[in-house]
Amino acid sequence: MMYTRHYKYLRLYGYPLFAVFLNLILILLNSDESNIKDWKFYSNTDFLIEGLFCLLYTVALFETGLWLSKMINSTSVLKKNGSLRFFFKLLLHIVIISVLVILFFSIDFPQKYGYNDLVVRRALIIGLIFSILITTAFTAEELLIKWNESQLEAIENKKQALQSELNALKLQLDPHFLFNNLSTLTSLIEENQDTAVQ
């Protein structure tokens, strides 16, 4: 199943790339005059810290999605109803990300970061959008894996059916083969006993 894989490449390359993308989105959204003035007081460390915040946000978004997919798909209650499972997963993902964002912005950051209510709302909206995208992507992956498994199962069933037919044909052929040999031997005995013995 999908959870046996470790998403090595997603974690190694995807998270940092997505964090840079997320940081660029936030910079574009927050590029009003007051923020541009505040950036003058930023050191390289401050830009690095904001980049790390974006990386943490990225990790929270994806890892929460993975964890919810694993947890909800393993429960037998929602196994049969795919759309209910999707919406339940999505709702939980949005709630968890919203709580994490609110907790994060409740920290008292220095004034130069310019974290205000508008930034919190934007982070919540971005979390909502990416929760939808991530939940949809993981659900689509699950469906693709299940479809592949059903295809493999159908191929295996077909192979077993063909093997059973082959075995049945072998069983049908064996008596005929024996009967033909006995008939040939019988005719040889009648005609030439020495050849029949050989």
Image (cartoon, grey):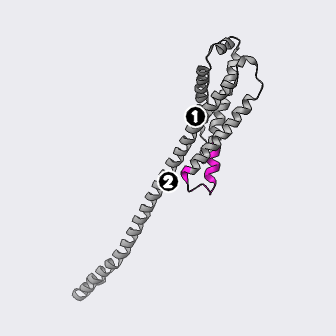
Q: Position of residue 133 (x, y in %)?
A: 55, 37
Choose top left, top right, bottom left or bottom right for residue 95: top right
What residue is drawn where x is 58% and y is 34%?
129
Q: Which mark is residue 179?
A: none
Between 137 and 113, the one lying in front of the other is 113
Residue beneath label 2, please? Answer: 149
Q: Which residues are magenta?
A: 66-83
In what element is the residue under mark 1? helix
Image: 137 above or below 174 = above
Label 2 element class = helix
**Magenta span has 82?**
yes
* Residue on which disc 1 sits: 129
**Contact flag, marks 1 and 2 (Cβ < 8 Å):** no
7 horizontally vs 194: left or right: right
Q: Gap in Å between the C-alphas at discs 1 and 2?
A: 30 Å
- Disc 2 marks which amino acid? Glu
Give the vertical position of 54 relative to 10 (above or below). Answer: above
Q: Amino acid at mark 1?
A: Ile
Residue 183 within the segment the image draws in magenta: no
